Image (cartoon, grey):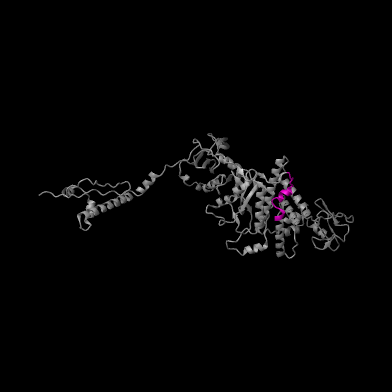
Amino acid sequence: MPKRTKNTEDPLKEAAGECLPRESNEENNAVAESMAESVVSAAAEENLEEEGDFELESESEDSDLESADEESDSEPEPPARRPKRGTGSKGIEETTTSSPVEAWNGTDEEDIAPEPPSFRPARTPGAQLLNGVSYTVLDLFQCFLSNSILQTIVINTNKYGQENHTKWKKITLKDLYSYLSMLIYSGFFKVTSMSDYWKMSELYTFSFPSTVMSCKKFSDIAGSIQLSDPKDDAANNKKKGTADYDRLCKIKPMYEEVRQSCKACYHPRQNIAVDERLVKSKARTGLKQYMKNKRRKWGFKFFVLADSSNGYTWDFTVFEGKNHHRTGKGLGYDTVMDLVTPKVLGTGYKLYVDNFYTSRTLFLDLLEKRIRACGTIRSNQLGPLRLKSGQLDKKSPRGCIRWIREGPIVFVQWKDTRDVLMCSTIHKAHGEDTIQRNMKDVEGQWAMNSIAVPPAILDYNKNMGAVDHSDALISYYNVLHRTKRWYRSFFYHFVDIAVVNAFILHKELASAKGERVMTQKKFRETLVLELRAAGTPNTAAQRAPLFHSDNYPNACTIRGVSHMPVYFTPDSTQGRRRCVLCHLKTPLGCSTCDKPLCFRHERQCFNLWHDQL
């Protein structure tokens, strides 16, 4: 009996045909072919997702099948093995289609030096003062603290004094000049209490303060100094908890005036720097910040833009908190964009910042404004560059340089005592510059050796210290004192900024004229004398010379110093003063101690006082 053979083209088509209703052979064949194609495509996709390296092998449509008996005699194919996890086609596709990883370069690879920026400042760099005018020290100081802002402080201080003191005597602009003279004078000699400047004893022989103003008047002004209008403060306090509340309302008039004056009187040169400044304070206010890298950990944080050539404070802002002026790009980004304004500054400037501000986004946005930048960068800001090979390791020698460029930005790694990361749109990656370092040689002996250093690091160290230089000038003779009101700490710092900037203007003018430049101490001494001359003379402090009476012999001698009772005036009925012991009026006092003391039979205050010495 002859064997019957099946003439099917594909077992998948046959299986699909059996699942369909038997209407017509042509329809069945067409539907079977379509279903077979869908099953094949689905199986192929499933195999690609699950089997990884295994490919679906499909039989050729032209091959004929063997007979049913031969088919039954053939052994079944073994099932396909399941691939290992993580070796699917998705991972293979990513590795095969990704571009090759670019490594960090060494000094053997040459970098392309960026074109130098075209420096176009908005004004001529330097002092913006009238030509041909001779400025005194007081005139330079008044460039930053003008009579208008000082008169505003006088008005607000009188309002505050009348509201908070029962016996308040109104002050004038001349009184404020005297107060500023004494305030700057206090930067020369530090005492534990401000009243020590007016003591008349052997330990405190300050004769100058009494010629400026009395101790009581100085204390009254210091305890009532007010920068803003008390009515504005009261209205602002009602807005607490709302978006309209201004945390800087108490300092806003003087704050804005000093900022505008600093920018109007000077224009910075090409190299500028932005950094932080901390004004120490123990006030209990939300504006106070903690900075672990500063010598004084607690205080008010300022962001300062300074000229790298001389440390001139050109602009500054007060840090109000993380929730203010946020654009979603970071506090450092917002700060730099607020301080660096090409419309006021110009273009072509070179900005130096530290790793608190440096980021790709900031440097690219500054480059669009035609301002170059350079600064240290944190490793977490490198992004994908951290995964690339060729970086420095612990075994890298000192002076080793690695770099990589991304368009206009170059990232540099330099090995010193620790790894230094730099980012710049100004410099090329490496050059021929070297520096001296004390290192051990092969024999273990210490010796000075020359190591390579990137140009970005040299320029960064040269120009980044502008704010630190300004801080140093302030710290030498600062007028900051302890106060119960946080906004008065800002007042003291604004006075320091005015004095230091005026001193820098003096150096600019004197150098341009070829004149001798005063030291900062001499400059401050001259300013103190000119402020005293512009202030109110203290007639009450100008005491008449002591009138020595011949009726009394030497009363006592203490440690070789003679103490003699004397009259204050030739007429004992006039010029009587209160005794320091019994507080009764007396015309006598000690010629050495300059203390009013009774010297009568019933009141021997003179002897009692000197027995205590």
The vertical placement of 28 against 376, above or below, is: below
Quarter containing the C terminus = bottom right
Q: Residue furthest right?
A: 551
Question: In the rendering, at what x and y percent does residue 353 appear?
Answer: 57, 46
Q: Residue at x 71, y 62 (%)?
A: 159
In the image, 7 versus 168, the foreground residue is 7
Question: Which residue occupies 60% across, 57% down?
Answer: 287
Is residue 18 in the magenta section? no
Residue 222, percent from left and from top? 71, 58
The image quadrant that residue 486 belongs to is: bottom right
In the figure, 404 relative to 477: above or below?
above
Total numbered labels placed on residues in the image: 0
- Residue 73 in percent (x, y) is at 17, 48
Q: Is residue 338 left or right of residue 508?
A: left
Which region is colored magenta?
Answer: 132-149
Residue 581 in sight in this render: yes
Q: Is residue 134 magenta?
A: yes
User: Residue sitting at 52 percent across and 54 percent down?
Assistant: 328
Closest to the observer, 223 or 160: 160
Asked if residue 547 lies left or right of residue 2, the reply is right
Q: How far across and down, in percent of the image, does residue 476 sit? A: 68, 48
- State the residue lying farthest toward the top: 443
